[in-house]
Amino acid sequence: MASNSFGQIFRITTFGESHGPAIGVIVDGVPPNLPLTESDIQFELDRRKPGQSKVTTHRKEPDKAEILSGIFEGKTTGAPVALLIRNEDQRSKDYEDIKNLFRPGHADYTYWMKYGNRDYRGGGRASGRETACRVAAGAIAKKILHQHKIIVVAYTLAIGGIYAKKKDFSVIEKNIVRAPDLEAAEQMIAKVEEVRKSCDSIGGIVEAVVHGCPPGLGDPVYDKLNARLACALMSIGAVRGVEFGAGFAAAGMLGSQHNDKFYMDGDRVRTRTNHAGGILGGISDGEDIVLRLAVKPTSSIAQKQSTVSRDFKAAILEVKGRHDPCICPRVVPVVEAMIAITLVDALMMQKALK
Amino acid sequence: MASNSFGQIFRITTFGESHGPAIGVIVDGVPPNLPLTESDIQFELDRRKPGQSKVTTHRKEPDKAEILSGIFEGKTTGAPVALLIRNEDQRSKDYEDIKNLFRPGHADYTYWMKYGNRDYRGGGRASGRETACRVAAGAIAKKILHQHKIIVVAYTLAIGGIYAKKKDFSVIEKNIVRAPDLEAAEQMIAKVEEVRKSCDSIGGIVEAVVHGCPPGLGDPVYDKLNARLACALMSIGAVRGVEFGAGFAAAGMLGSQHNDKFYMDGDRVRTRTNHAGGILGGISDGEDIVLRLAVKPTSSIAQKQSTVSRDFKAAILEVKGRHDPCICPRVVPVVEAMIAITLVDALMMQKALK
Amino acid sequence: MASNSFGQIFRITTFGESHGPAIGVIVDGVPPNLPLTESDIQFELDRRKPGQSKVTTHRKEPDKAEILSGIFEGKTTGAPVALLIRNEDQRSKDYEDIKNLFRPGHADYTYWMKYGNRDYRGGGRASGRETACRVAAGAIAKKILHQHKIIVVAYTLAIGGIYAKKKDFSVIEKNIVRAPDLEAAEQMIAKVEEVRKSCDSIGGIVEAVVHGCPPGLGDPVYDKLNARLACALMSIGAVRGVEFGAGFAAAGMLGSQHNDKFYMDGDRVRTRTNHAGGILGGISDGEDIVLRLAVKPTSSIAQKQSTVSRDFKAAILEVKGRHDPCICPRVVPVVEAMIAITLVDALMMQKALK
Amino acid sequence: MASNSFGQIFRITTFGESHGPAIGVIVDGVPPNLPLTESDIQFELDRRKPGQSKVTTHRKEPDKAEILSGIFEGKTTGAPVALLIRNEDQRSKDYEDIKNLFRPGHADYTYWMKYGNRDYRGGGRASGRETACRVAAGAIAKKILHQHKIIVVAYTLAIGGIYAKKKDFSVIEKNIVRAPDLEAAEQMIAKVEEVRKSCDSIGGIVEAVVHGCPPGLGDPVYDKLNARLACALMSIGAVRGVEFGAGFAAAGMLGSQHNDKFYMDGDRVRTRTNHAGGILGGISDGEDIVLRLAVKPTSSIAQKQSTVSRDFKAAILEVKGRHDPCICPRVVPVVEAMIAITLVDALMMQKALK
């Protein structure tokens, strides 16, 4: 185990269950003398929190982060920054009916087989609630990236086959599915509403772009920047696939098409295309890092489903609780956070070797 | 850096450049008393080595692995196993013409920006030759998995849009593209030949299946089994994307379709479908682990390409050397190796906590 | 950095300053299904807490640990256990006078040079208060060791040259200096009282014994059990040296004296002497692990001392606050905790390779 | 396990047994563009190699290091540097008689209990021969420190109670025990000769000084510079204790004596004494780092000793082979190497956070 940490120099360690007293994160390796307040963190937490709109769960969590350490007189000291988020709107009784059933698509069965126990109240550690800690830590990472003029933007590229056709980043936070295309957003929202009404859920694609990343970040061989990012992003519960640049489309391309030709843009080396997604040989090349994530439809749906019980008998499950019909809009800030954390770690590693 | 290691308890550390005197790997955390000979390792190395067929590079490397440590009287001792592979068929002069040019699709430019130097002879550390060490280490991992009756099989699912339609594992090693469908293999081979003749290269998809993995492997949160596997596989140079189970197709699915319903198969919990790809909440569920990789077309092609030089001027590149028109068949054993290494590490971690 | 974690599989990560809102620890890698309550932890915390007797600081901290995660229905789940301890009896104003001075023997100057800032209120992260988190985590480690019948005992062997002559473990908790010899304890206490009255402090030696450790724990080469223990114990602020078995006395011995001869004790291999301190080649040999720590006199003394200020001018320091004239009795539970944490990690690592 | 690596950013990984074909080390995290030749490494290896003088073992090993990777055109590239040392003067038959006996003071018994096997030829992985790899890697670390004007010097402070009374570093390499006092060296040599004639061995104390270390290296809490150094040095097989600055003498001191008073020496903050040994709160303070190691008498002695056999029966052991009557002079370069490796890692970690 010891699997609740991510990162090497800039490292987060998280704890907490969705229905315990609190969740939280220790962020180690924060550079000293960085201005940091609770509102910096709250801003990002508010983007992830439940109950924001009709397309997200109605669970209400204020998700207020308390800074417990690492800040003195408004600035980081170099000591670890601990953030605590108390759980509030817990309805453990929602889970009473299903405490002995393995929910399809959830980690109930695998936790049971791994640990021989199960915190049935909302998924325990496997709950999406854990991602609030990632977002809180990511807010710190983003502040560091901001100093380096590196910007991370994620958005919903598609829901259930409906794709954004434009990439207007200015509208992402102006529609409840976080699509970069208001027109497509309308269709996506309609689709999610329809799905919700049929007690179902639906998947989608989240895309992310990193702008301003200097060339040279990432390490060759096992800690390639794309490998580290893939690990960071596949560790988000709902993600089923990750691709960079041309991604799976590269499988159908010729080398002469796929190779990004270099050219001089003033005194800067650029590439005419970006099929590599900003990473060559595991190291950033200065072009935008572009990646996409397959997001599965939420496993919690209100339909009756056949399953088995903890005593290994066939059973029928009917999940209550409050769930997201499409998790993409809430995955967006989590994706940004994990990318930001990975990049800060890579930045620091690069400085170590200069 | 320190990025030349992979794994936590079962950990490989590799070294060597394609045109230096040797490459090699130290495998730490090998359990004691495992029978192991050089021929166990050679078997896997031979599957990866260049010059096997008309669809691979004509570079000839015997790739003989010498065991330098960790074995006594035919068995592992628990000490690290070091494997050394001398380089032989080097033609550094092939690279003289391009020593000052950044090859499109290669790591030349990013290494230059990261390190301020460049071993121009064949890519140095970024060369695919590094993967021989992964395969050698993977042979040890496979022997350990074999003791647990866990089988890892990878194969070429598609090349340039031509898909295997059958999955007959018995034919994989009987065709030079390593497809599980002899008929599709014929078409793929024809496609690769055509591409080679036009001095080009082509991408494909490699799929892998792990059979016999017990439930409970992998850790929740940041070391999810799929996250670790994604990291392991994205660290292979040619890979541009990775997906598990339904993968990107899940983005278009409803929860009611995607959720794998549990049922009792005798005394074993199984799922009726396997959209999750054998991993739920980051932990193996006992179903086959199924994953797919997007493999880009090889960057080295014999066509003239526009690029820039090390002194930042426009230039025309003409790559000589001997290259693979489609790298999929040689990626297959590397994929198996990285999966095997990741699983052994997960197995050991799981034992630690029992 | 990322230096606020200790351990590999069983890993603690701590945060918090002595005068911030709280300190705490995340314990990752706790095996599932271990009964654990707050009172298990409180018992050990009470042994370390300030204000216990006339030989310790009069600072009063209830040091109540709140369990925030990882426990369900009275047992560990396998998820990380987070423990929170709120700070209460802070008198930051005690530190106003010295906020611009570097206290001799403290980390003020080195933190300033490292981080360019300083949380002057009681030492911030360098405060001995940090060790409460170690003790809290150590309480969990001790419970795990208890299941393996491994007992860790530490005690004050000497204070200012007064040595315990007996080793009666039953009296350790019955005297306020935690010596295993009541008569020597009386003399030690008198010595500490005398030192306190002269506004000074005094050093000592803490010894620890691990009984019941099975042969085979620890790894050869860089993770030798003694190397890991040395790291764990030298990370306690007041420790200036560590020795195992014969320790520094071995420097004056002959091989024929120092070698511990093996013999059969029934069906168990034992050694006639224990100069190696229970560890051979970095691996436990089944004899008691015996080690000793040099504990420096507390740096905070009430005498006037010459020093320099943050603007690099000569100055006179007069420390107020409430300090320990001899820290040995309060170091004892910290030593036990760090040993227990190290052993649990070694136990798990050993299981991983079986 | 995975215990054959040391360091985080600058990390060494070693392999090899004393009687296998070769030993070697991979040094990862070497900064690029550092001039490095085999003779840089050979210089340090020659200081450690056996057969140098009458006070060391007569085993003859040329210990020639071959650089296998990481160097291009005379400079490091940033890729891992692998060093290979072939074993030559093996006399495995020296060990035939003792293959079934557990040698007192050696790791034979503990390896047997840990791994269930044993490479009886000369200790296998537990052999002091492994330290050649540390010295080879340390040569690289020293070159890096040299660029920062940091000098690491170790020497024999005492053998069997005979102490160096002077510290004249210029004579260390001019006497075969590596003492900084020629007169004391004479006495030490006479003592070792006497011990050798009586088929015995003798212990000693090795002291090390680091000059020129800037303030700010090392991390608070668990990666204190002294904790990391203690780990590094206790991992050397013959070491039984480590102390910094006043060390165990601090146990008898008053705080008013022990506290190192700060003063301004021009524009530099200095301390009037150096009881802390150059490290305050785990971070270097700019004074010389001073530490001492207890070195046990070599376990291999030519006297008959009672012991037990692998089938757990009483037995008499008579060790042949060629051994060091006092290992201190050969430990000296190993100590320097481990300190250098630890400091380079700390330097890099510090840069990461600037």
Image: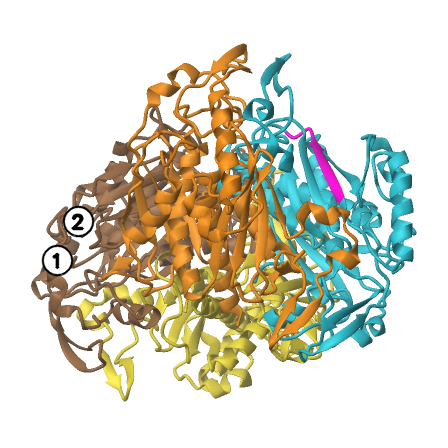
Chain colours: A brown, B yellow, C orange, D cyan
Residue at x-position 76% and y-position 59%: D299
Residue B57 visible at all: no
The numbered dot on residue B69 is: none
Residue at x-position 16% and y-position 57%: A324
Say if A245 sits above or below B331 in the image.
above
The numbered dot on residue A322 is: 1
Task: Pinpoint residue B126: horizontal percent, then vertical percent.
Answer: 60, 56
Q: As rendered, which of C176 and D333 lies closer to the eye?
A: C176
Region of the chain picked out in magenta, as a range = D205-213
Magenta run includes residue D207: yes
Q: Secondary structure at mark 1?
A: loop
Label 2, label 1: how many angstroms apart (C-alpha)? Answer: 10 Å
Residue placed under numbered mark 2 in the picture: A50
Say if C192 sits above or below A45 in the image.
above
- Residue type at numbered disc 2: Pro
Left or right, B286 with reference to D69: left
- Mark 2 or 1, nearer chain start: 2
> Mark 2–mark 1 contact, CB under 8 Å?
yes
Count of labels in the image? 2
Quadrant position of the C terminus of chain A in the picture = top right
Q: As rendered, which of C316 and B223 lies closer to the eye?
A: C316
Residue A103 visible at all: yes
- Residue type at numbered disc 1: Arg
Quadrant position of the N terminus of chain A in the picture = bottom left
Chain bearing tag 1 is A
